[in-house]
Amino acid sequence: MSETNQNGAMVKFYRGNNIPLELHKVRVVQKLHLNPIEDRLRALREAGFNSFLLKTKDTFLDMLTDSGCNAMSDRQTAAMMIADDAYAGSQSYDRMEAKVLELFGKQFILPVHQGRAAENIISRAFIQPGDHIPMNYHFTTTKAHIELNGGTIHEIYTDEALKIKSDHPFKGNMDIEKLKTVINEFGAEGIPFIRLEASTNLIGGQPFSMKNMRQVREVANKAGIMIVLDASLIGENAWFIKQRESEYHHKGMGAIIREMSDLSDLVYFSARKLSSSRGGIICTAREDLYDQMRDMVPLFEGFLTYGGMSVREIEAMAVGLEETLDNHMICQSPSFIDYFVRKVDGLGIPVVTPGGALGAHIDAGSFLSHIPQTQYPAGALVSAFYLISGIRGMERGTVSSVRLDDGSDLPADIELMRLAFPRRVFTLSQIEYAIDRLCWLYENRQLVGGLEWEKEPKVLRFFVGRLKPIGDWPERLMAKFRSDFGESL
Ligand code: F0G
Protein backbone atom coordinates (compact mmCIF):
# COMPACT_ATOMS: atom_id res chain seq x y z
CA MET A 1 0.00 0.00 0.00
CA SER A 2 1.91 3.07 -1.10
CA GLU A 3 1.60 6.46 0.58
CA THR A 4 0.78 8.03 -2.74
CA ASN A 5 -2.13 5.74 -3.34
CA GLN A 6 -3.68 6.70 -0.01
CA ASN A 7 -3.36 10.38 -0.86
CA GLY A 8 -6.66 12.01 -1.71
CA ALA A 9 -5.88 13.23 -5.16
CA MET A 10 -3.03 10.82 -5.68
CA VAL A 11 -0.72 13.81 -5.87
CA LYS A 12 2.82 13.44 -4.66
CA PHE A 13 4.20 16.35 -2.62
CA TYR A 14 7.69 17.61 -3.45
CA ARG A 15 8.73 17.78 0.23
CA GLY A 16 7.28 14.38 1.15
CA ASN A 17 4.75 14.18 4.02
CA ASN A 18 1.91 13.51 1.67
CA ILE A 19 -1.39 14.82 2.92
CA PRO A 20 -4.80 14.25 1.38
CA LEU A 21 -5.46 16.89 -1.25
CA GLU A 22 -9.04 17.88 -1.94
CA LEU A 23 -10.14 18.08 -5.55
CA HIS A 24 -13.17 20.17 -4.75
CA LYS A 25 -13.77 23.64 -3.41
CA VAL A 26 -16.13 24.80 -0.70
CA ARG A 27 -18.90 27.08 -1.96
CA VAL A 28 -21.65 26.73 0.63
CA VAL A 29 -20.77 26.68 4.31
CA GLN A 30 -22.56 26.15 7.59
CA LYS A 31 -21.62 27.86 10.84
CA LEU A 32 -20.50 25.55 13.63
CA HIS A 33 -20.75 26.00 17.39
CA LEU A 34 -17.81 25.35 19.66
CA ASN A 35 -19.35 26.10 23.05
CA PRO A 36 -17.52 26.35 26.40
CA ILE A 37 -16.94 23.01 28.16
CA GLU A 38 -19.42 23.93 30.94
CA ASP A 39 -22.18 24.17 28.30
CA ARG A 40 -21.07 20.88 26.80
CA LEU A 41 -21.36 19.13 30.16
CA ARG A 42 -24.91 20.48 30.49
CA ALA A 43 -25.74 19.25 26.98
CA LEU A 44 -24.24 15.83 27.73
CA ARG A 45 -26.37 15.47 30.85
CA GLU A 46 -29.49 16.51 28.93
CA ALA A 47 -28.60 13.89 26.31
CA GLY A 48 -28.34 11.10 28.90
CA PHE A 49 -24.66 10.53 27.99
CA ASN A 50 -25.87 9.23 24.64
CA SER A 51 -24.40 11.05 21.62
CA PHE A 52 -27.51 10.20 19.55
CA LEU A 53 -29.45 12.54 21.84
CA LEU A 54 -27.09 15.52 21.51
CA LYS A 55 -28.20 18.44 19.38
CA THR A 56 -26.09 19.89 16.59
CA LYS A 57 -26.37 23.36 18.15
CA ASP A 58 -24.26 21.92 21.00
CA THR A 59 -21.84 20.09 18.69
CA PHE A 60 -18.69 21.34 16.99
CA LEU A 61 -17.65 18.54 14.61
CA ASP A 62 -20.48 16.10 14.02
CA MET A 63 -18.68 12.80 13.55
CA LEU A 64 -21.66 10.71 14.61
CA THR A 65 -22.15 9.25 11.16
CA ASP A 66 -21.66 9.75 7.46
CA SER A 67 -25.26 8.65 6.88
CA GLY A 68 -27.23 11.35 5.11
CA CYS A 69 -24.60 13.99 5.86
CA ASN A 70 -21.97 13.59 3.16
CA ALA A 71 -21.50 16.87 1.28
CA MET A 72 -23.72 17.23 -1.78
CA SER A 73 -22.20 18.26 -5.07
CA ASP A 74 -23.33 21.27 -7.11
CA ARG A 75 -24.66 18.82 -9.69
CA GLN A 76 -26.73 17.03 -7.08
CA THR A 77 -28.34 20.20 -5.75
CA ALA A 78 -28.96 21.37 -9.30
CA ALA A 79 -30.67 18.07 -10.15
CA MET A 80 -33.01 18.52 -7.19
CA MET A 81 -34.46 21.58 -8.91
CA ILE A 82 -35.73 19.59 -11.87
CA ALA A 83 -37.45 16.92 -9.82
CA ASP A 84 -40.70 15.70 -11.29
CA ASP A 85 -43.42 15.59 -8.64
CA ALA A 86 -45.76 12.73 -9.35
CA TYR A 87 -47.24 9.95 -7.27
CA ALA A 88 -46.70 7.45 -10.07
CA GLY A 89 -44.48 7.31 -13.13
CA SER A 90 -42.20 10.23 -12.21
CA GLN A 91 -39.37 11.02 -14.61
CA SER A 92 -37.12 11.47 -11.58
CA TYR A 93 -37.67 7.81 -10.80
CA ASP A 94 -36.85 6.85 -14.40
CA ARG A 95 -33.55 8.74 -14.20
CA MET A 96 -32.65 7.03 -10.93
CA GLU A 97 -33.69 3.61 -12.21
CA ALA A 98 -31.44 4.06 -15.26
CA LYS A 99 -28.46 4.86 -13.00
CA VAL A 100 -29.10 1.84 -10.76
CA LEU A 101 -29.25 -0.36 -13.85
CA GLU A 102 -26.06 1.20 -15.23
CA LEU A 103 -24.12 0.67 -11.98
CA PHE A 104 -25.43 -2.69 -10.85
CA GLY A 105 -26.73 -4.25 -14.06
CA LYS A 106 -29.87 -5.42 -12.28
CA GLN A 107 -33.15 -4.52 -13.92
CA PHE A 108 -35.67 -5.38 -11.19
CA ILE A 109 -35.52 -2.40 -8.87
CA LEU A 110 -37.45 -1.52 -5.73
CA PRO A 111 -37.17 1.88 -4.02
CA VAL A 112 -37.34 2.15 -0.22
CA HIS A 113 -37.06 5.04 2.21
CA GLN A 114 -33.70 3.92 3.68
CA GLY A 115 -31.43 0.92 4.20
CA ARG A 116 -33.28 -0.70 7.08
CA ALA A 117 -36.50 -0.61 5.08
CA ALA A 118 -34.73 -2.80 2.52
CA GLU A 119 -33.67 -5.09 5.36
CA ASN A 120 -37.25 -5.29 6.58
CA ILE A 121 -38.52 -6.32 3.15
CA ILE A 122 -35.69 -8.77 2.41
CA SER A 123 -36.03 -10.39 5.86
CA ARG A 124 -39.82 -10.73 5.58
CA ALA A 125 -39.57 -12.13 2.05
CA PHE A 126 -36.87 -14.73 2.55
CA ILE A 127 -36.48 -15.65 6.25
CA GLN A 128 -38.56 -18.31 7.99
CA PRO A 129 -38.42 -18.87 11.76
CA GLY A 130 -35.46 -21.16 12.53
CA ASP A 131 -33.41 -20.05 9.49
CA HIS A 132 -29.69 -19.27 9.67
CA ILE A 133 -27.99 -16.38 7.91
CA PRO A 134 -24.20 -16.45 7.53
CA MET A 135 -22.55 -13.06 7.04
CA ASN A 136 -19.11 -11.48 7.25
CA TYR A 137 -20.38 -9.34 10.14
CA HIS A 138 -23.70 -7.99 11.30
CA PHE A 139 -24.98 -4.44 11.17
CA THR A 140 -27.29 -3.36 14.02
CA THR A 141 -30.47 -2.85 11.97
CA THR A 142 -29.79 -5.93 9.82
CA LYS A 143 -29.49 -8.16 12.84
CA ALA A 144 -32.64 -6.67 14.38
CA HIS A 145 -34.72 -7.38 11.24
CA ILE A 146 -33.34 -10.89 10.77
CA GLU A 147 -34.08 -11.78 14.38
CA LEU A 148 -37.53 -10.16 14.23
CA ASN A 149 -38.34 -12.67 11.48
CA GLY A 150 -37.06 -15.64 13.49
CA GLY A 151 -33.62 -15.96 11.87
CA THR A 152 -30.25 -16.39 13.56
CA ILE A 153 -27.12 -14.66 12.33
CA HIS A 154 -23.71 -16.33 12.04
CA GLU A 155 -20.72 -14.07 11.76
CA ILE A 156 -18.06 -15.76 9.71
CA TYR A 157 -15.13 -13.41 9.87
CA THR A 158 -11.46 -14.30 9.62
CA ASP A 159 -9.08 -14.34 12.57
CA GLU A 160 -7.75 -10.99 11.38
CA ALA A 161 -11.09 -9.16 11.50
CA LEU A 162 -11.22 -8.27 15.17
CA LYS A 163 -7.52 -7.57 15.62
CA ILE A 164 -7.23 -3.88 16.42
CA LYS A 165 -3.71 -3.53 15.04
CA SER A 166 -3.27 -5.19 11.70
CA ASP A 167 -1.97 -4.44 8.26
CA HIS A 168 -4.31 -6.89 6.59
CA PRO A 169 -5.82 -5.16 3.56
CA PHE A 170 -9.13 -7.08 3.68
CA LYS A 171 -10.31 -7.55 7.26
CA GLY A 172 -13.90 -7.75 6.00
CA ASN A 173 -13.25 -11.10 4.28
CA MET A 174 -15.38 -14.12 5.04
CA ASP A 175 -13.63 -17.23 6.36
CA ILE A 176 -14.42 -19.75 3.61
CA GLU A 177 -13.76 -22.88 5.67
CA LYS A 178 -16.00 -21.64 8.49
CA LEU A 179 -18.69 -20.84 5.92
CA LYS A 180 -18.59 -24.42 4.64
CA THR A 181 -18.85 -25.70 8.24
CA VAL A 182 -21.93 -23.56 8.92
CA ILE A 183 -23.57 -24.79 5.70
CA ASN A 184 -22.79 -28.41 6.63
CA GLU A 185 -24.16 -27.89 10.11
CA PHE A 186 -27.49 -26.27 9.21
CA GLY A 187 -27.99 -27.51 5.65
CA ALA A 188 -28.58 -25.30 2.62
CA GLU A 189 -32.36 -25.56 3.07
CA GLY A 190 -32.10 -23.73 6.42
CA ILE A 191 -30.00 -20.92 4.91
CA PRO A 192 -32.04 -18.53 2.74
CA PHE A 193 -29.03 -16.41 1.83
CA ILE A 194 -25.44 -15.52 2.63
CA ARG A 195 -25.04 -11.82 3.41
CA LEU A 196 -21.91 -9.89 2.51
CA GLU A 197 -21.51 -6.34 3.73
CA ALA A 198 -19.23 -4.08 1.70
CA SER A 199 -16.76 -2.07 3.85
CA THR A 200 -17.96 -3.95 6.92
CA ASN A 201 -19.23 -1.18 9.16
CA LEU A 202 -19.04 -2.52 12.72
CA ILE A 203 -15.50 -3.89 12.52
CA GLY A 204 -14.16 -0.53 11.39
CA GLY A 205 -15.31 -0.01 7.81
CA GLN A 206 -13.08 -2.85 6.59
CA PRO A 207 -13.41 -4.11 3.00
CA PHE A 208 -13.49 -7.63 1.58
CA SER A 209 -11.51 -8.58 -1.50
CA MET A 210 -12.93 -9.59 -4.86
CA LYS A 211 -11.02 -12.85 -4.54
CA ASN A 212 -12.86 -13.59 -1.30
CA MET A 213 -16.19 -12.66 -2.84
CA ARG A 214 -15.54 -15.06 -5.73
CA GLN A 215 -14.76 -17.82 -3.22
CA VAL A 216 -18.00 -17.13 -1.35
CA ARG A 217 -19.84 -17.30 -4.69
CA GLU A 218 -18.29 -20.68 -5.44
CA VAL A 219 -19.42 -22.09 -2.10
CA ALA A 220 -22.87 -20.53 -2.54
CA ASN A 221 -23.20 -22.02 -6.04
CA LYS A 222 -22.30 -25.50 -4.83
CA ALA A 223 -24.83 -25.30 -2.01
CA GLY A 224 -27.48 -23.53 -4.10
CA ILE A 225 -27.72 -20.55 -1.74
CA MET A 226 -28.15 -16.98 -2.92
CA ILE A 227 -25.90 -14.06 -2.00
CA VAL A 228 -27.30 -10.78 -0.69
CA LEU A 229 -24.91 -7.85 -0.87
CA ASP A 230 -25.31 -4.88 1.47
CA ALA A 231 -23.85 -2.28 -0.87
CA SER A 232 -24.29 0.78 1.36
CA LEU A 233 -20.51 1.34 1.31
CA ILE A 234 -19.74 -0.34 -2.01
CA GLY A 235 -17.94 2.69 -3.46
CA GLU A 236 -15.27 2.62 -0.77
CA ASN A 237 -14.98 -1.19 -0.87
CA ALA A 238 -14.48 -0.99 -4.64
CA TRP A 239 -11.87 1.73 -4.15
CA PHE A 240 -9.99 -0.43 -1.62
CA ILE A 241 -10.10 -3.33 -4.09
CA LYS A 242 -8.63 -1.02 -6.72
CA GLN A 243 -5.87 0.09 -4.32
CA ARG A 244 -5.09 -3.16 -2.58
CA GLU A 245 -5.81 -6.04 -4.97
CA SER A 246 -3.17 -6.03 -7.69
CA GLU A 247 -5.29 -7.38 -10.53
CA TYR A 248 -7.71 -4.44 -10.07
CA HIS A 249 -5.24 -1.52 -10.02
CA HIS A 250 -6.06 -0.63 -13.58
CA LYS A 251 -9.77 -1.37 -13.54
CA GLY A 252 -12.29 1.42 -13.36
CA MET A 253 -14.64 1.87 -10.41
CA GLY A 254 -17.61 1.02 -12.61
CA ALA A 255 -16.14 -2.33 -13.66
CA ILE A 256 -15.30 -3.26 -10.07
CA ILE A 257 -18.75 -2.33 -8.75
CA ARG A 258 -20.39 -4.26 -11.59
CA GLU A 259 -18.29 -7.34 -10.85
CA MET A 260 -19.35 -7.21 -7.19
CA SER A 261 -22.96 -6.88 -8.24
CA ASP A 262 -22.67 -9.72 -10.77
CA LEU A 263 -21.46 -11.99 -7.97
CA SER A 264 -24.64 -11.22 -5.97
CA ASP A 265 -28.21 -12.38 -6.50
CA LEU A 266 -29.65 -9.43 -4.69
CA VAL A 267 -28.13 -6.04 -3.89
CA TYR A 268 -29.50 -3.48 -1.46
CA PHE A 269 -28.16 -0.24 -0.11
CA SER A 270 -28.79 2.72 2.09
CA ALA A 271 -28.55 5.73 -0.23
CA ARG A 272 -27.85 7.80 2.89
CA LYS A 273 -24.37 6.34 2.67
CA LEU A 274 -23.86 5.47 -0.97
CA SER A 275 -25.05 8.58 -2.74
CA SER A 276 -25.27 11.26 -0.05
CA SER A 277 -28.99 11.83 -0.08
CA ARG A 278 -31.81 9.81 1.43
CA GLY A 279 -33.49 6.60 0.46
CA GLY A 280 -32.49 3.12 -0.45
CA ILE A 281 -32.75 0.51 -3.17
CA ILE A 282 -33.15 -3.22 -3.57
CA CYS A 283 -32.24 -4.60 -6.98
CA THR A 284 -31.92 -8.01 -8.58
CA ALA A 285 -31.72 -9.57 -12.03
CA ARG A 286 -34.05 -12.37 -10.90
CA GLU A 287 -37.74 -11.79 -11.44
CA ASP A 288 -38.70 -14.54 -8.97
CA LEU A 289 -36.92 -12.71 -6.15
CA TYR A 290 -38.45 -9.40 -7.21
CA ASP A 291 -41.93 -10.94 -7.17
CA GLN A 292 -41.45 -12.14 -3.60
CA MET A 293 -40.68 -8.60 -2.44
CA ARG A 294 -42.59 -6.24 -4.70
CA ASP A 295 -45.93 -6.03 -2.92
CA MET A 296 -44.31 -4.99 0.32
CA VAL A 297 -43.12 -1.70 -1.18
CA PRO A 298 -46.61 -0.13 -1.56
CA LEU A 299 -47.53 -1.66 1.81
CA PHE A 300 -44.64 -0.32 3.91
CA GLU A 301 -42.89 2.35 1.83
CA GLY A 302 -44.93 4.06 -0.86
CA PHE A 303 -45.78 3.56 -4.51
CA LEU A 304 -43.27 1.68 -6.68
CA THR A 305 -41.91 4.86 -8.25
CA TYR A 306 -40.96 6.64 -5.03
CA GLY A 307 -40.77 4.11 -2.17
CA GLY A 308 -41.05 6.72 0.58
CA MET A 309 -38.50 9.10 -0.90
CA SER A 310 -39.18 12.63 -2.12
CA VAL A 311 -38.55 13.17 -5.83
CA ARG A 312 -35.78 15.64 -4.94
CA GLU A 313 -33.98 12.93 -2.99
CA ILE A 314 -34.41 10.57 -5.91
CA GLU A 315 -32.77 13.08 -8.27
CA ALA A 316 -29.86 13.61 -5.87
CA MET A 317 -29.50 9.86 -5.57
CA ALA A 318 -29.26 9.41 -9.34
CA VAL A 319 -26.44 11.95 -9.61
CA GLY A 320 -24.79 10.63 -6.44
CA LEU A 321 -24.68 7.12 -7.87
CA GLU A 322 -22.94 8.42 -10.97
CA GLU A 323 -20.43 10.35 -8.87
CA THR A 324 -19.58 7.18 -6.94
CA LEU A 325 -17.62 6.16 -10.03
CA ASP A 326 -15.28 9.14 -9.55
CA ASN A 327 -12.38 7.81 -7.51
CA HIS A 328 -11.26 11.31 -6.54
CA MET A 329 -14.60 11.77 -4.86
CA ILE A 330 -14.87 8.31 -3.35
CA CYS A 331 -11.35 8.29 -1.90
CA GLN A 332 -11.83 11.57 -0.03
CA SER A 333 -13.17 10.01 3.15
CA PRO A 334 -10.79 6.97 3.22
CA SER A 335 -7.83 9.32 2.61
CA PHE A 336 -8.74 11.58 5.51
CA ILE A 337 -9.36 8.51 7.69
CA ASP A 338 -5.98 7.10 6.66
CA TYR A 339 -4.30 10.41 7.57
CA PHE A 340 -6.03 10.48 10.97
CA VAL A 341 -5.35 6.81 11.74
CA ARG A 342 -1.65 7.02 10.87
CA LYS A 343 -1.17 10.10 13.05
CA VAL A 344 -3.15 8.75 16.00
CA ASP A 345 -1.40 5.39 15.77
CA GLY A 346 1.95 7.21 15.68
CA LEU A 347 1.00 8.91 18.97
CA GLY A 348 0.49 5.49 20.57
CA ILE A 349 -3.29 5.86 20.83
CA PRO A 350 -5.10 2.54 20.20
CA VAL A 351 -6.92 2.75 16.87
CA VAL A 352 -8.14 0.18 14.37
CA THR A 353 -5.60 -0.27 11.58
CA PRO A 354 -5.47 -0.10 8.66
CA GLY A 355 -7.85 2.82 8.22
CA GLY A 356 -11.06 1.72 6.51
CA ALA A 357 -14.19 3.39 5.17
CA LEU A 358 -16.69 5.74 6.79
CA GLY A 359 -14.75 6.56 9.94
CA ALA A 360 -11.79 6.06 12.25
CA HIS A 361 -12.33 3.65 15.10
CA ILE A 362 -10.64 4.19 18.45
CA ASP A 363 -10.19 1.06 20.55
CA ALA A 364 -12.00 2.13 23.70
CA GLY A 365 -11.27 -1.22 25.35
CA SER A 366 -7.54 -0.43 25.55
CA PHE A 367 -7.93 3.37 25.71
CA LEU A 368 -9.97 2.96 28.91
CA SER A 369 -8.66 -0.44 30.00
CA HIS A 370 -9.54 0.41 33.64
CA ILE A 371 -13.28 0.44 32.77
CA PRO A 372 -14.91 -3.03 32.60
CA GLN A 373 -17.18 -3.85 29.65
CA THR A 374 -20.14 -3.88 32.04
CA GLN A 375 -19.54 -0.13 32.50
CA TYR A 376 -19.43 0.60 28.78
CA PRO A 377 -15.92 1.92 27.98
CA ALA A 378 -16.90 2.90 24.41
CA GLY A 379 -19.89 4.90 25.66
CA ALA A 380 -17.69 6.52 28.31
CA LEU A 381 -15.05 7.44 25.71
CA VAL A 382 -17.61 9.02 23.37
CA SER A 383 -18.99 11.08 26.28
CA ALA A 384 -15.56 12.13 27.53
CA PHE A 385 -14.36 13.05 24.03
CA TYR A 386 -17.44 15.15 23.37
CA LEU A 387 -17.00 16.89 26.72
CA ILE A 388 -13.41 17.92 26.07
CA SER A 389 -13.68 18.68 22.33
CA GLY A 390 -17.28 19.29 21.28
CA ILE A 391 -16.83 16.43 18.79
CA ARG A 392 -19.66 13.95 18.61
CA GLY A 393 -18.65 10.36 17.88
CA MET A 394 -20.69 7.17 18.07
CA GLU A 395 -20.55 4.29 20.53
CA ARG A 396 -19.96 0.99 18.74
CA GLY A 397 -19.52 -1.38 21.65
CA THR A 398 -21.67 -3.06 24.28
CA VAL A 399 -24.21 -0.21 24.48
CA SER A 400 -24.90 -0.98 20.79
CA SER A 401 -25.29 -4.66 21.66
CA VAL A 402 -28.32 -6.35 23.27
CA ARG A 403 -29.45 -7.75 26.61
CA LEU A 404 -29.82 -11.53 26.73
CA ASP A 405 -32.84 -13.41 28.08
CA ASP A 406 -31.01 -14.03 31.37
CA GLY A 407 -30.77 -10.26 31.85
CA SER A 408 -27.03 -9.96 31.18
CA ASP A 409 -25.43 -7.83 28.47
CA LEU A 410 -24.08 -9.57 25.40
CA PRO A 411 -20.58 -8.03 25.46
CA ALA A 412 -19.48 -6.58 22.12
CA ASP A 413 -16.55 -8.30 20.39
CA ILE A 414 -14.72 -4.98 20.35
CA GLU A 415 -15.40 -1.68 22.13
CA LEU A 416 -15.07 1.10 19.59
CA MET A 417 -15.58 4.84 19.44
CA ARG A 418 -16.34 5.63 15.82
CA LEU A 419 -15.47 9.04 14.49
CA ALA A 420 -17.20 9.26 11.13
CA PHE A 421 -15.67 11.16 8.22
CA PRO A 422 -18.58 12.17 6.00
CA ARG A 423 -17.27 12.80 2.48
CA ARG A 424 -15.93 16.28 1.74
CA VAL A 425 -17.29 17.77 4.98
CA PHE A 426 -14.29 18.47 7.24
CA THR A 427 -11.07 20.36 6.66
CA LEU A 428 -7.64 19.08 7.60
CA SER A 429 -7.30 21.69 10.37
CA GLN A 430 -10.49 20.39 11.96
CA ILE A 431 -9.04 16.88 11.78
CA GLU A 432 -5.83 18.17 13.41
CA TYR A 433 -7.98 19.64 16.23
CA ALA A 434 -9.63 16.22 16.70
CA ILE A 435 -6.20 14.55 16.91
CA ASP A 436 -4.95 17.17 19.37
CA ARG A 437 -7.90 16.79 21.76
CA LEU A 438 -7.81 12.99 21.51
CA CYS A 439 -4.14 13.08 22.46
CA TRP A 440 -4.94 15.21 25.53
CA LEU A 441 -7.70 12.82 26.53
CA TYR A 442 -5.39 9.84 26.18
CA GLU A 443 -2.92 11.46 28.54
CA ASN A 444 -5.75 12.11 31.02
CA ARG A 445 -7.64 8.85 30.46
CA GLN A 446 -7.41 7.74 34.10
CA LEU A 447 -9.86 10.52 34.97
CA VAL A 448 -12.60 8.92 32.85
CA GLY A 449 -15.03 6.55 34.57
CA GLY A 450 -17.81 4.23 33.45
CA LEU A 451 -21.51 4.61 32.69
CA GLU A 452 -24.67 2.86 33.83
CA TRP A 453 -28.20 2.78 32.41
CA GLU A 454 -30.82 5.23 33.53
CA LYS A 455 -33.42 4.24 30.93
CA GLU A 456 -32.83 1.24 28.67
CA PRO A 457 -35.14 0.53 25.70
CA LYS A 458 -35.71 -3.09 24.70
CA VAL A 459 -34.99 -2.74 20.95
CA LEU A 460 -31.97 -0.93 19.43
CA ARG A 461 -31.31 0.55 22.87
CA PHE A 462 -28.35 2.65 21.76
CA PHE A 463 -30.52 5.04 19.76
CA VAL A 464 -32.62 6.58 22.54
CA GLY A 465 -31.41 4.94 25.76
CA ARG A 466 -30.24 7.21 28.60
CA LEU A 467 -27.14 6.57 30.71
CA LYS A 468 -25.42 8.33 33.62
CA PRO A 469 -21.83 8.52 34.81
CA ILE A 470 -20.68 6.33 37.69
CA GLY A 471 -19.29 8.91 40.11
CA ASP A 472 -18.34 12.53 39.35
CA TRP A 473 -15.72 11.87 36.67
CA PRO A 474 -17.15 14.38 34.14
CA GLU A 475 -16.67 17.23 36.66
CA ARG A 476 -13.14 16.10 37.45
CA LEU A 477 -12.28 15.82 33.77
CA MET A 478 -13.70 19.29 33.15
CA ALA A 479 -11.62 20.73 36.00
CA LYS A 480 -8.43 19.23 34.52
CA PHE A 481 -9.37 20.62 31.09
CA ARG A 482 -9.78 24.11 32.56
CA SER A 483 -6.48 23.89 34.40
CA ASP A 484 -4.64 22.84 31.22
CA PHE A 485 -6.45 24.98 28.63
CA GLY A 486 -7.44 28.03 30.72
CA GLU A 487 -10.32 29.94 29.13
CA SER A 488 -9.90 28.26 25.75
CA LEU A 489 -12.88 26.66 24.13
N1 F0G B 1 -26.28 -1.37 6.24
C1 F0G B 1 -25.15 -0.75 6.58
C2 F0G B 1 -23.84 -1.36 6.24
C3 F0G B 1 -25.21 0.48 7.25
O1 F0G B 1 -24.08 1.09 7.60
C4 F0G B 1 -26.46 1.04 7.56
C5 F0G B 1 -26.57 2.29 8.28
C6 F0G B 1 -27.62 0.35 7.17
C7 F0G B 1 -27.49 -0.87 6.51
C8 F0G B 1 -28.99 0.88 7.47
O2 F0G B 1 -29.25 1.94 6.64
O3 F0G B 1 -29.54 3.91 8.18
O4 F0G B 1 -30.38 3.96 5.82
O5 F0G B 1 -31.51 2.56 7.50
N2 F0G B 1 -25.61 2.83 8.90
C9 F0G B 1 -25.68 4.08 9.65
C10 F0G B 1 -24.36 4.36 10.34
C11 F0G B 1 -26.84 4.20 10.56
O6 F0G B 1 -24.29 5.39 11.03
O7 F0G B 1 -23.39 3.63 10.19
P1 F0G B 1 -30.23 3.16 7.06
Image (cartoon, rainbow, N blue to C red):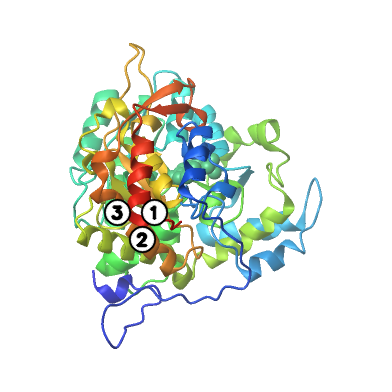
The spot of residue 384 in percent (x, y) is 37, 42
Residue 115 can be seen in this image: no
Q: Residue at x 63, y 42 (%)?
A: 113
Q: Residue at x 73, y 53 (%)?
A: 311
Q: Percent from the top left, x then y, of residue 110? A: 62, 44
Mark 2 is surrounded, within 10 Å at the Cα level, by few (under 14), some (14 to 19) or many (20 or more) other residues, namely many
Q: What amino acid is found at the position of numbered circle 3 in the picture?
A: Trp
Q: Nearer the viewer, mark 3 or mark 2?
A: 3
Q: Image point 67% across, 54% down: which residue? A: 314
Q: Is mark 3 within 8 Å of ligand 1?
A: no
Label 1 crowd (10 A; few <14 / some 14-19 / many >=20): many
Q: Residues within 10 Å of mark 3 (few under 14, many from 20)?
A: some
Q: Which mark is residue 337?
A: 2
> For the residue marked with disc 2, what is the amino acid?
Ile
Circle on res. 440: 3
Nearest the eye: 178 or 485: 485
